[in-house]
Amino acid sequence: MKKHNFSAGPCILPEEVLQKASEAIINFNNDNLSLIEISHRSKPFVQVIEKARSLALELLGLENKGYQALFLQGGASFQFLMTAYNLLNKKAAYLNTGTWSSNAIKEAKLFGDLVEVATSKDKNFNYIPKNYTVPTDVDYFHCTSNNTIYGTQIKSFPSVSVPMICDMSSDIFSRQLDFSQFDLIYAGAQKNMGPAGATLVVVKEDILGKVERTIPSMLNYQLHIAKESMFNTPPVFSVYVSMLTLEWLKDLGGIKFIEKVNEQKSALLYHEIDRNPLFKGVVEKEDRSHMNATFTLTDASLTEKFDTLWKEANINGLHGHRSAGGYRASMYNALPLYSVQALVDVMQELERKA
Protein backbone atom coordinates (compact mmCIF):
# COMPACT_ATOMS: atom_id res chain seq x y z
CA MET A 1 0.00 0.00 0.00
CA LYS A 2 1.39 3.38 -1.00
CA LYS A 3 2.14 5.75 1.85
CA HIS A 4 0.20 8.91 2.58
CA ASN A 5 2.81 11.29 1.23
CA PHE A 6 2.94 14.71 2.88
CA SER A 7 6.47 15.45 1.63
CA ALA A 8 7.13 19.10 0.84
CA GLY A 9 9.13 18.30 -2.27
CA PRO A 10 9.84 16.38 -4.31
CA CYS A 11 6.13 15.94 -3.89
CA ILE A 12 3.38 13.41 -4.39
CA LEU A 13 2.30 12.87 -8.00
CA PRO A 14 -0.94 11.40 -9.38
CA GLU A 15 -0.92 7.61 -9.55
CA GLU A 16 -1.95 7.56 -13.20
CA VAL A 17 0.87 9.97 -14.05
CA LEU A 18 3.41 7.70 -12.36
CA GLN A 19 2.02 4.72 -14.27
CA LYS A 20 2.27 6.44 -17.66
CA ALA A 21 5.74 7.78 -16.86
CA SER A 22 7.00 4.36 -15.81
CA GLU A 23 5.73 2.85 -19.06
CA ALA A 24 7.46 5.59 -21.06
CA ILE A 25 10.76 4.79 -19.36
CA ILE A 26 10.59 1.34 -20.95
CA ASN A 27 8.86 2.09 -24.23
CA PHE A 28 7.98 5.65 -25.17
CA ASN A 29 5.44 6.35 -27.87
CA ASN A 30 5.52 2.66 -28.93
CA ASP A 31 8.88 3.29 -30.59
CA ASN A 32 10.67 0.59 -28.56
CA LEU A 33 12.95 3.22 -27.08
CA SER A 34 13.00 4.66 -23.59
CA LEU A 35 11.87 8.24 -23.06
CA ILE A 36 15.22 8.98 -21.42
CA GLU A 37 17.29 7.72 -24.34
CA ILE A 38 15.58 9.40 -27.29
CA SER A 39 16.87 12.59 -28.87
CA HIS A 40 15.40 15.74 -27.38
CA ARG A 41 15.29 17.04 -30.94
CA SER A 42 13.16 14.14 -32.13
CA LYS A 43 9.61 14.89 -33.23
CA PRO A 44 7.99 12.88 -30.39
CA PHE A 45 9.74 14.87 -27.67
CA VAL A 46 9.35 18.21 -29.42
CA GLN A 47 5.62 17.51 -29.34
CA VAL A 48 5.87 16.80 -25.60
CA ILE A 49 7.55 20.08 -24.70
CA GLU A 50 5.29 22.07 -26.99
CA LYS A 51 2.24 20.53 -25.35
CA ALA A 52 3.61 21.14 -21.85
CA ARG A 53 4.22 24.80 -22.64
CA SER A 54 0.78 25.16 -24.21
CA LEU A 55 -0.99 23.46 -21.30
CA ALA A 56 0.74 25.71 -18.78
CA LEU A 57 -0.56 28.84 -20.51
CA GLU A 58 -4.01 27.33 -21.00
CA LEU A 59 -4.46 26.34 -17.36
CA LEU A 60 -3.28 29.77 -16.19
CA GLY A 61 -5.61 31.54 -18.62
CA LEU A 62 -2.71 33.28 -20.33
CA GLU A 63 -3.09 32.05 -23.90
CA ASN A 64 -2.88 34.77 -26.54
CA LYS A 65 -2.06 37.43 -23.97
CA GLY A 66 1.58 38.03 -24.84
CA TYR A 67 3.04 35.39 -22.52
CA GLN A 68 5.55 32.64 -23.20
CA ALA A 69 5.99 29.45 -21.15
CA LEU A 70 9.48 28.03 -20.79
CA PHE A 71 10.85 24.88 -19.21
CA LEU A 72 14.33 25.67 -17.92
CA GLN A 73 16.75 24.16 -15.39
CA GLY A 74 18.37 25.12 -12.10
CA GLY A 75 15.23 25.20 -9.98
CA ALA A 76 13.53 28.26 -8.55
CA SER A 77 16.80 29.17 -6.85
CA PHE A 78 18.36 29.81 -10.26
CA GLN A 79 15.46 32.13 -11.07
CA PHE A 80 16.41 34.33 -8.10
CA LEU A 81 19.44 35.22 -10.18
CA MET A 82 17.93 35.02 -13.66
CA THR A 83 15.01 37.38 -13.01
CA ALA A 84 17.36 40.06 -11.70
CA TYR A 85 19.81 39.56 -14.56
CA ASN A 86 17.03 40.14 -17.11
CA LEU A 87 14.95 42.80 -15.38
CA LEU A 88 16.93 44.78 -12.80
CA ASN A 89 18.47 47.96 -14.19
CA LYS A 90 18.79 50.15 -11.12
CA LYS A 91 16.36 49.30 -8.34
CA ALA A 92 13.78 46.64 -7.47
CA ALA A 93 11.27 46.09 -4.67
CA TYR A 94 10.94 42.82 -2.72
CA LEU A 95 8.49 41.49 -0.16
CA ASN A 96 10.34 39.31 2.35
CA THR A 97 8.15 36.50 3.69
CA GLY A 98 10.68 33.77 4.40
CA THR A 99 13.75 31.81 3.40
CA TRP A 100 13.11 31.75 -0.34
CA SER A 101 12.32 35.44 -0.70
CA SER A 102 15.34 36.20 1.49
CA ASN A 103 17.48 34.17 -0.91
CA ALA A 104 15.97 35.98 -3.88
CA ILE A 105 16.85 39.31 -2.26
CA LYS A 106 20.43 38.17 -1.70
CA GLU A 107 20.89 37.33 -5.40
CA ALA A 108 19.19 40.48 -6.69
CA LYS A 109 21.49 42.71 -4.64
CA LEU A 110 24.29 41.67 -7.00
CA PHE A 111 22.63 43.66 -9.80
CA GLY A 112 21.26 46.83 -8.25
CA ASP A 113 19.64 48.52 -5.29
CA LEU A 114 16.91 46.74 -3.36
CA VAL A 115 13.91 48.11 -1.48
CA GLU A 116 12.46 45.67 1.06
CA VAL A 117 8.88 46.93 1.15
CA ALA A 118 7.93 44.76 4.15
CA THR A 119 9.02 41.69 6.07
CA SER A 120 7.57 39.25 8.59
CA LYS A 121 10.97 38.29 9.96
CA ASP A 122 10.12 39.87 13.32
CA LYS A 123 7.79 36.93 14.08
CA ASN A 124 9.77 34.20 12.37
CA PHE A 125 7.77 34.65 9.17
CA ASN A 126 4.50 33.38 10.67
CA TYR A 127 2.36 35.99 8.87
CA ILE A 128 2.10 37.92 5.59
CA PRO A 129 2.77 41.68 5.86
CA LYS A 130 -0.14 43.95 4.93
CA ASN A 131 -0.63 47.59 3.96
CA TYR A 132 2.82 48.11 2.49
CA THR A 133 3.57 50.43 -0.40
CA VAL A 134 5.41 49.41 -3.56
CA PRO A 135 7.46 52.32 -4.99
CA THR A 136 6.65 53.45 -8.51
CA ASP A 137 10.28 54.13 -9.43
CA VAL A 138 11.48 50.49 -9.33
CA ASP A 139 12.07 48.13 -12.23
CA TYR A 140 9.79 45.47 -10.74
CA PHE A 141 8.18 44.10 -7.58
CA HIS A 142 8.97 40.53 -6.45
CA CYS A 143 6.98 38.35 -4.06
CA THR A 144 6.70 34.68 -3.08
CA SER A 145 3.12 33.46 -3.18
CA ASN A 146 3.48 30.56 -0.75
CA ASN A 147 6.07 29.97 1.94
CA THR A 148 6.81 26.24 1.93
CA ILE A 149 8.89 26.27 5.11
CA TYR A 150 6.77 28.40 7.42
CA GLY A 151 3.33 27.70 5.93
CA THR A 152 2.09 31.14 4.92
CA GLN A 153 0.33 32.08 1.69
CA ILE A 154 -0.46 35.45 0.13
CA LYS A 155 -4.25 35.69 -0.23
CA SER A 156 -4.38 39.13 -1.82
CA PHE A 157 -1.71 40.57 -4.08
CA PRO A 158 -1.03 44.32 -4.25
CA SER A 159 -2.07 46.45 -7.18
CA VAL A 160 1.17 47.82 -8.59
CA SER A 161 2.19 50.08 -11.46
CA VAL A 162 5.41 48.18 -12.14
CA PRO A 163 5.96 44.61 -13.40
CA MET A 164 5.11 42.02 -10.73
CA ILE A 165 7.27 38.92 -10.44
CA CYS A 166 6.13 35.95 -8.39
CA ASP A 167 7.81 32.79 -7.17
CA MET A 168 4.93 30.28 -7.20
CA SER A 169 6.99 27.16 -6.70
CA SER A 170 4.82 25.61 -4.00
CA ASP A 171 1.30 26.64 -5.03
CA ILE A 172 1.38 26.88 -8.82
CA PHE A 173 -1.84 25.51 -10.40
CA SER A 174 -3.46 25.06 -6.97
CA ARG A 175 -5.87 28.01 -6.80
CA GLN A 176 -7.64 30.46 -9.06
CA LEU A 177 -6.01 33.84 -9.50
CA ASP A 178 -5.96 36.52 -12.15
CA PHE A 179 -2.59 35.37 -13.43
CA SER A 180 -2.45 38.28 -15.90
CA GLN A 181 -1.62 40.56 -12.96
CA PHE A 182 1.83 38.94 -12.96
CA ASP A 183 4.42 39.77 -15.59
CA LEU A 184 6.66 36.82 -14.72
CA ILE A 185 5.89 33.65 -12.76
CA TYR A 186 8.40 30.95 -11.98
CA ALA A 187 8.07 27.61 -10.22
CA GLY A 188 10.24 24.59 -9.63
CA ALA A 189 8.38 21.55 -10.93
CA GLN A 190 8.99 19.38 -7.89
CA LYS A 191 6.55 21.12 -5.56
CA ASN A 192 3.25 20.69 -7.40
CA MET A 193 3.85 19.75 -11.00
CA GLY A 194 6.42 17.03 -11.62
CA PRO A 195 9.77 15.58 -10.60
CA ALA A 196 12.79 17.72 -9.84
CA GLY A 197 14.81 18.92 -12.80
CA ALA A 198 12.56 21.38 -14.63
CA THR A 199 11.53 24.92 -13.79
CA LEU A 200 8.49 26.54 -15.34
CA VAL A 201 8.85 30.21 -16.28
CA VAL A 202 5.85 32.12 -17.64
CA VAL A 203 6.86 35.56 -18.81
CA LYS A 204 5.20 38.46 -20.59
CA GLU A 205 7.48 39.19 -23.52
CA ASP A 206 7.12 42.98 -23.46
CA ILE A 207 8.98 43.31 -20.13
CA LEU A 208 12.16 41.84 -21.62
CA GLY A 209 15.06 43.46 -23.44
CA LYS A 210 15.17 46.60 -21.30
CA VAL A 211 18.28 46.13 -19.18
CA GLU A 212 21.53 47.78 -20.17
CA ARG A 213 23.83 44.87 -19.36
CA THR A 214 24.83 42.11 -21.74
CA ILE A 215 23.07 38.91 -20.65
CA PRO A 216 24.93 35.58 -21.02
CA SER A 217 23.13 33.19 -23.35
CA MET A 218 22.04 30.66 -20.73
CA LEU A 219 20.55 33.45 -18.60
CA ASN A 220 18.70 35.24 -21.38
CA TYR A 221 14.93 34.71 -21.41
CA GLN A 222 14.65 36.11 -24.92
CA LEU A 223 17.06 33.52 -26.25
CA HIS A 224 15.20 30.68 -24.53
CA ILE A 225 11.95 31.97 -26.02
CA ALA A 226 13.49 32.14 -29.50
CA LYS A 227 14.77 28.57 -29.11
CA GLU A 228 11.43 27.35 -27.70
CA SER A 229 13.03 25.99 -24.50
CA MET A 230 15.50 24.04 -26.61
CA PHE A 231 18.62 26.21 -26.43
CA ASN A 232 20.30 23.33 -24.62
CA THR A 233 19.16 19.79 -23.81
CA PRO A 234 16.05 20.12 -21.62
CA PRO A 235 15.36 17.83 -18.63
CA VAL A 236 13.41 15.37 -20.76
CA PHE A 237 11.90 13.20 -18.03
CA SER A 238 10.85 16.11 -15.81
CA VAL A 239 9.22 17.93 -18.73
CA TYR A 240 7.37 14.79 -19.80
CA VAL A 241 5.99 14.07 -16.33
CA SER A 242 5.04 17.74 -15.93
CA MET A 243 3.12 17.48 -19.19
CA LEU A 244 1.30 14.38 -17.92
CA THR A 245 0.45 16.15 -14.65
CA LEU A 246 -0.89 19.18 -16.50
CA GLU A 247 -3.01 16.86 -18.68
CA TRP A 248 -4.30 15.16 -15.53
CA LEU A 249 -5.23 18.52 -14.02
CA LYS A 250 -6.99 19.68 -17.18
CA ASP A 251 -9.00 16.44 -17.39
CA LEU A 252 -10.11 16.87 -13.76
CA GLY A 253 -11.52 20.29 -14.51
CA GLY A 254 -8.49 22.52 -14.22
CA ILE A 255 -7.58 24.93 -11.45
CA LYS A 256 -11.23 25.73 -10.66
CA PHE A 257 -11.83 22.09 -9.72
CA ILE A 258 -8.61 21.44 -7.84
CA GLU A 259 -8.95 24.61 -5.77
CA LYS A 260 -12.15 23.25 -4.21
CA VAL A 261 -10.42 19.96 -3.38
CA ASN A 262 -7.46 21.80 -1.85
CA GLU A 263 -9.80 23.92 0.27
CA GLN A 264 -11.50 20.76 1.56
CA LYS A 265 -8.18 19.19 2.51
CA SER A 266 -6.79 22.23 4.29
CA ALA A 267 -10.08 22.93 6.08
CA LEU A 268 -10.17 19.37 7.41
CA LEU A 269 -6.65 19.53 8.80
CA TYR A 270 -6.78 23.07 10.19
CA HIS A 271 -10.07 22.29 11.93
CA GLU A 272 -8.39 19.42 13.77
CA ILE A 273 -5.33 21.53 14.62
CA ASP A 274 -7.61 24.16 16.17
CA ARG A 275 -9.94 21.67 17.87
CA ASN A 276 -7.37 19.30 19.33
CA PRO A 277 -5.74 20.67 22.52
CA LEU A 278 -2.55 18.69 21.79
CA PHE A 279 -1.76 20.71 18.65
CA LYS A 280 -1.16 24.34 17.81
CA GLY A 281 -0.91 26.05 14.44
CA VAL A 282 2.23 28.07 13.75
CA VAL A 283 0.82 30.64 11.31
CA GLU A 284 -1.66 33.48 11.77
CA LYS A 285 -5.01 32.03 10.70
CA GLU A 286 -5.73 34.55 7.95
CA ASP A 287 -2.41 33.72 6.26
CA ARG A 288 -2.47 29.93 6.50
CA SER A 289 -1.30 28.09 3.41
CA HIS A 290 -3.60 25.59 1.69
CA MET A 291 -0.48 23.77 0.51
CA ASN A 292 1.75 23.56 3.60
CA ALA A 293 0.16 23.36 7.04
CA THR A 294 2.66 23.89 9.88
CA PHE A 295 1.91 22.95 13.47
CA THR A 296 3.49 21.86 16.74
CA LEU A 297 2.63 19.74 19.75
CA THR A 298 1.55 21.69 22.84
CA ASP A 299 3.36 19.09 24.95
CA ALA A 300 6.80 18.21 23.57
CA SER A 301 6.92 15.06 25.72
CA LEU A 302 4.37 13.52 23.33
CA THR A 303 6.72 13.80 20.34
CA GLU A 304 7.91 10.21 20.37
CA LYS A 305 4.40 8.84 20.79
CA PHE A 306 2.99 10.99 17.97
CA ASP A 307 5.88 10.15 15.64
CA THR A 308 5.32 6.45 16.25
CA LEU A 309 1.60 6.73 15.58
CA TRP A 310 1.84 8.55 12.26
CA LYS A 311 4.60 6.32 10.98
CA GLU A 312 2.57 3.23 11.92
CA ALA A 313 -0.35 4.76 9.99
CA ASN A 314 1.73 4.66 6.79
CA ILE A 315 2.27 8.43 6.75
CA ASN A 316 5.41 9.95 5.21
CA GLY A 317 7.10 13.35 5.22
CA LEU A 318 5.47 15.00 8.22
CA HIS A 319 8.52 16.47 9.95
CA GLY A 320 8.90 20.23 9.66
CA HIS A 321 11.73 21.84 7.73
CA ARG A 322 15.08 21.52 9.49
CA SER A 323 15.17 25.29 10.06
CA ALA A 324 11.67 25.50 11.52
CA GLY A 325 11.06 22.27 13.43
CA GLY A 326 7.62 21.03 14.41
CA TYR A 327 5.46 19.39 11.78
CA ARG A 328 4.49 20.25 8.23
CA ALA A 329 1.78 18.57 6.18
CA SER A 330 2.18 19.42 2.50
CA MET A 331 -1.13 18.96 0.69
CA TYR A 332 -0.31 19.39 -2.97
CA ASN A 333 -2.79 18.83 -5.78
CA ALA A 334 -2.26 15.07 -6.05
CA LEU A 335 -2.68 14.34 -2.33
CA PRO A 336 -6.09 12.69 -1.86
CA LEU A 337 -8.54 13.81 0.81
CA TYR A 338 -8.40 10.40 2.47
CA SER A 339 -4.70 10.95 3.23
CA VAL A 340 -5.57 14.08 5.19
CA GLN A 341 -8.26 12.12 6.98
CA ALA A 342 -5.67 9.48 7.88
CA LEU A 343 -3.54 12.18 9.53
CA VAL A 344 -6.53 13.62 11.38
CA ASP A 345 -7.37 10.13 12.64
CA VAL A 346 -3.84 9.81 14.08
CA MET A 347 -4.10 13.20 15.75
CA GLN A 348 -7.37 12.13 17.37
CA GLU A 349 -5.85 8.82 18.42
CA LEU A 350 -3.05 10.67 20.17
CA GLU A 351 -5.65 12.74 22.00
CA ARG A 352 -7.41 9.60 23.22
CA LYS A 353 -4.17 7.98 24.38
CA ALA A 354 -2.51 11.02 25.93
Image (cartoon, helix red, strand yellow):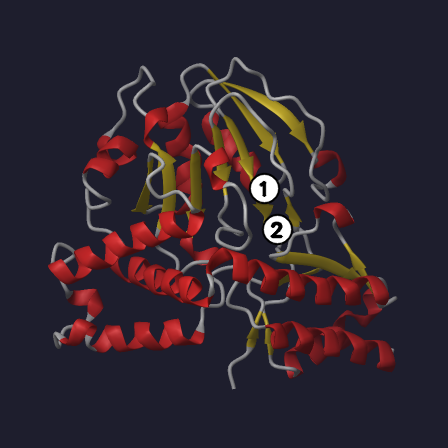
Q: Which residue is mark 1?
A: 99
List the residue tagged with mark 2: 149
The furthest residue to the bottom: 1
Amino acid type at mark 1: Thr
The image shows residue 242 at horizontal and vertical percentages of 36, 60
- Label 2 residue SS: loop
**Image quarter for residue 94?**
top right
What percent of the width, then of the height, locates residue 248? 40, 67
Question: Is residue 155 in view?
Answer: yes
Which corner quadrant of the image does residue 144 belong to? top right
Residue type (three-letter) at the residue carrying disc 2: Ile
- Which of 296/93 is in front? 93
At x 20%, y 46%, the residue is 230
Number of residues whose C-alpha sits closer than 10 Å to that of mark 2, classed few (under 14), some (14–19) or many (20 or more): many
In the picture, measured across the screen, residue 135 lies left or right of residue 54, that is: right
The correct choice, above or below, for 306 with respect to 173 in the image is below
Q: Give the x, y percent position of residue 140.
A: 48, 24
Q: Report the quarter where the C terminus lies.
A: bottom right
Percent from the top left, x then y, of residue 81?
40, 33
Tell which of 321 and 275 is nearer to you: 275
What residue is shown at x 21% (from left), y 66% (from top)? Answer: 36
Relative to 200, is 6 on the left or the right? right
* Residue at 48 percent of width and 53 percent of height: 173
Residue 8 seen in this snapshot: no
**Disc 1 residue crowd, few under 14, some 14–19, many 20+, Cα 10 Å:** some
Question: Rounded to the nearest whole Å, what is the CA distance between mark 1 and mark 2?
Answer: 8 Å
> Please, what secondary structure does the residue beneath circle 1 have?
helix
Q: Is residue 279 above or below residue 115?
A: below
Q: Earlier in the sequence, mark 1 or mark 2?
A: 1
Q: Are marks 1 and 2 in contact (CB under 8 Å)?
A: yes
Q: Residue at x 50, y 17 (%)?
A: 138
Q: Which quarter of the picture shows residue 14?
A: bottom left
